[in-house]
Image: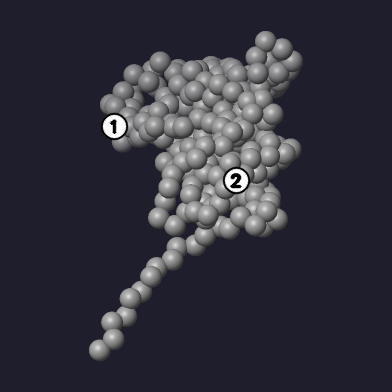
Amino acid sequence: MKEFLDYPIIETGKYALRVSNLLGLAILVLTLLLTLYLIRRLIFRSQRFDISKKYALYRLCKYFLTVIAFVLGFQILGFNVSILLAGSAALLVGLGLGIQSLFSDVISGIIILIDGTVKVNDVIDVNGIICQVKDINFRTTTVLTRDDKYIILPNSEFTKNRIVNWTHSEIISRFEISIGVDYSSDIHQVQKILQQVSAAHPSVMKSPEPFVRFTECADSSLIFTIFFWAEEVFRVENIKSEIRVSIFDAFKKEGIQIPFPQRVVHIKEP
């Protein structure tokens, strides 16, 4: 058995890759996978954390154990890691200068996972793009936009730029819809209709209750704004569309006009 384990598979100069090295590496990989599986089971079974914190904790454990396994793997294969690092110090310095942005993304990923300002399933606004966080990796974060396009962003985008997190503290968020009516309209009736229509929508929260504000006297119309709260943050545009349709039907039934810009043209006769 000892002869089989010491059998050299590859020999190059003073280095020899033996069967025992490959078996040790296989055992290390299996141990890593089993450990990660058990850690994942323990973390996701816990009731102390929400799903986003469980995800971040598991990712950090996975990265930490993977680095340790990577170093141990070199040792098992017969390489002295300390000598390799010392011998390649100059190369690492030059390489570090060339991959500063990559290193920044990696550090940003660790910061995101630790502080929890951006979590999986959060709805965020990045540079004017509304998207939902789907996956946070070591270097990049995958998000899904409202038009169902996946975008892979470097993690440094979340630490260098201003991010609007719609679901940071609460699941529900406040939204608004503006609409204009003719100057001849009864403003009290308009406010009542808008209040009733918004409150009747099944996706609008009953508490806090939606309310209507007389916003502005514009050039061609009186502007009213509905403020409401909803849990469906990512697909809220669908809710707004349904409310607008209901408003249009209610105005049509009550004879309330939605004006359009008009201009008076005076023509001088010769």
Q: Is residue 79 something one can see in this rendering?
A: no
- Please indicate whether residue 163 sits to the left or right of residue 233 in the image: left
Q: Residue at x 53, y 54 (%)?
A: 184
Quadrant hosting residue 216: top left
Query: Which of the pair 89/134 is nearer the observer?
Result: 134
- Where residue 39 appears, as percent x and y from the top left, is 68, 15
Q: Residue farthest to the bottom?
A: 270
Give the total of numbered labels: 2
* Dot 2 crowding, Cα within 10 Å, few <14, some 14–19, many 20+: some
Tag 2: residue type? Val
Read off the residue under disc 1. Answer: 97
Quadrant of the snapshot with the C terminus = bottom left
142 relative to 93, above or below: below
- How far apart are the alpha carbons under marks 2 and 1? 64 Å
Query: Which of the pair 251/116 is nearer the observer?
Result: 251
Q: What kind of colouring is applied to the model shown?
A: one colour
Secondary structure of the residue carrying tag 1 is: helix
Mark 2 or 1, closer to the camera: 2
Tag 1: residue type? Leu
Q: Looking at the rendered structure, which numbered label has been put on residue 16? A: none
Read off the residue under disc 2. Answer: 190
- Where residue 254 appears, as percent x and y from the top left, is 68, 53
- Please indicate whether residue 107 sits to the left or right of residue 206 in the image: left
Query: Which of the pair 41/119 is nearer the observer?
Result: 119
